[in-house]
């Protein structure tokens, strides 16, 4: 995420005025085992999905399931915002969806294992009520069912 | 998200990275750098209490990317129309597909890239008020949404074609080239102008998302 001062004035204003939930507390779960024994899932907010899946539309709070073994040639990005550049993602999907990097970390013994499915939301949402009340908890249940210990959430 | 948002939302563990939006792990095709970012992120798991909000420090950060509205397009001097540019770029795009194991950002419109010259014709006609719809448009997709997808595809196609032959260009050089030198970019800016004045609200609403 860029530093506020490096954004254009209009973008700074837009970002500062962006509606954002504010919480008093943080849900905290300590690690019960080392990362090298943990199962990791990748969750994106960059609007990725399998090519044949339904594109994201403006205000879309739902998520898409991307099986971990999906060939990156079969993954596409339909995020509706033009507030971020996609050029580097054209070159290397790992810059926002580090699918190869995570496999390498398993190979190096740094991560225990990876979940069967990864997930993507679309960010830049001004109304997150459905996300907080429905899709977020639904994803959490999916992750628990898969036995995921750690989620790597990678935004745009 | 910016750090300012994170301080309100208070996720349990967060690594604040200083890269431009869309470049979360810093540098494309630089696995060792991306691993440095991931190592810092996973390192937050060692903390015994939270919330944890840590900055990823780098010595230099890339400049903000130039936008279409900030530069003057001079593509008319090249003598190629947008349709000509797309046709000329076909071989390079196919080279890109071979170089990258068929990985491509093209595909949102649902139109095969071999038909992109016809898509350009549709956009030209739309801008001139001669077309309201396109026979290539998939069922169930609005004209407004289809226009947005077509523009995204044409941009991805054009960038990937360029990168196939000029791999050393950095992001800003690519954007400068695109917005200043290509007829495709000039057409996209004309489309944005046309959509922003359209009588249909959903088309007007998509105008800002076409280009900045």
Image (tube, coloured by chain):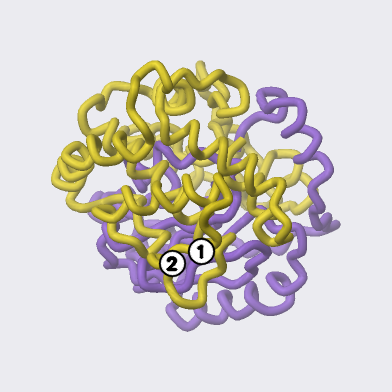
Tint of chain A: purple
| Label 1 – label 2 distance at C-alpha | 8 Å
Q: Is the residue under label 2 in contact with that under label 1 (CB below 8 Å)?
A: yes
Instruction: Look at the numbered disc 1 and give the secondary structure of its residue.
Output: loop
Residue marked by disc 1: B133
Left or right? Give the position of B201 relative to B30. Answer: right
Left or right? Give the position of B147 relative to A73. Answer: right
Which part of the image, by quadrant, shows the N terminus of chain A? top right
Q: Chain of mark 1?
A: B
Q: Of the residues tagged 1 and 2, which is closer to the observer?
A: 1
Residue at the image point whose x is 28% and y is 53% from the top: B113
Instruction: Look at the numbered disc 2 and give the secondary structure of its residue.
Output: loop
Front residue of A91 and A152: A91
The x and y percentages for residue A137 are 64, 77
Q: How many marks?
A: 2
Give the vertical position of B205 relative to A140 (above or below): above
The x and y percentages for residue A97 are 41, 52
**Can I make out residue B11 in this image?**
no
Residue marked by disc 2: B137
The x and y percentages for residue B80 are 33, 28
Q: Chain of mark 2?
A: B
**Do discs 1 and 2 share a chain?**
yes
The x and y percentages for residue B192 are 61, 42
Tint of chain B: yellow
Residue A26, quarter of the rendered image: bottom right
Residue at the image point whose x is 26% and y is 51% from the top: B103
Residue at the image point whose x is 16% and y is 40% from the top: B91
Front residue of B191 and A79: B191
**Can I make out residue A104 in this image?**
yes
Categorize mark 1 by other alpha carbons within 10 Å: few (<14), some (14-19), many (20+): some
- Residue B141's tag is none
Categorize mark 2 by other alpha carbons within 10 Å: few (<14), some (14-19), many (20+): some
């Amino acid at each position: 995420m860029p530093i506020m001062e490096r954004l254009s004035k209009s973008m700074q204003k837009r970002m500062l005025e962006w509606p954002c939930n504010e919480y008093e507390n943080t849900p905290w779960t300590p690690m019960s085992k080392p990362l090298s024994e943990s199962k990791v899932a990748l969750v994106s907010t960059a609007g990725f999905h399998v090519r044949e899946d339904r594109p994201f539309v403006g205000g879309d709070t739902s998520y898409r399931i991307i099986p971990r073994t999906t060939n990156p040639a079969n993954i596409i990005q339909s995020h509706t915002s033009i507030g971020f550049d996609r050029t580097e993602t054209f070159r290397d999907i790992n810059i926002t969806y580090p699918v190869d990097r995570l496999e390498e970390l398993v190979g190096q013994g740094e991560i225990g294992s990876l979940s069967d499915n990864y997930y993507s939301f679309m960010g830049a949402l001004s109304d997150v009520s459905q996300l907080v009340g429905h899709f977020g908890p639904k994803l959490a249940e999916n992750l628990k069912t898969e036995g995921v210990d750690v989620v790597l959430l990678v935004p745009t | 998200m910016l750090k300012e948002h994170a301080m309100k939302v208070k996720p349990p563990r967060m690594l604040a990275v200083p890269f431009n939006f869309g470049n979360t792990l810093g540098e494309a095709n630089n696995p060792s750098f991306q691993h440095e970012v991931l190592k810092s992120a996973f390192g937050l798991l060692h903390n015994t209490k939270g919330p944890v909000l840590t900055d990823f420090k780098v010595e230099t950060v890339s400049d903000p990317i130039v936008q279409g509205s900030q530069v003057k397009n001079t593509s008319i001097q090249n003598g190629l129309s947008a349709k000509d540019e797309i046709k000329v770029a076909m071989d390079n795009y196919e080279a890109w597909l071979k170089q990258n194991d068929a990985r491509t950002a093209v595909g949102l419109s649902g139109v095969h890239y071999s038909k992109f010259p016809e898509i350009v014709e549709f956009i030209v006609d739309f801008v001139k008020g001669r077309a309201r719809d396109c026979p290539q448009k998939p069922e169930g997709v609005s004209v407004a949404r289809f226009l947005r997808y077509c523009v995204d595809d044409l941009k991805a196609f054009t960038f990937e074609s360029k990168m196939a032959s000029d791999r050393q260009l950095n992001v800003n050089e690519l954007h400068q080239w695109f917005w200043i030198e290509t007829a495709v970019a000039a057409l996209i800016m004309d489309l944005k102008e046309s959509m922003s004045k359209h009588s249909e609200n959903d088309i007007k609403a998509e105008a800002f998302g076409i280009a900045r």
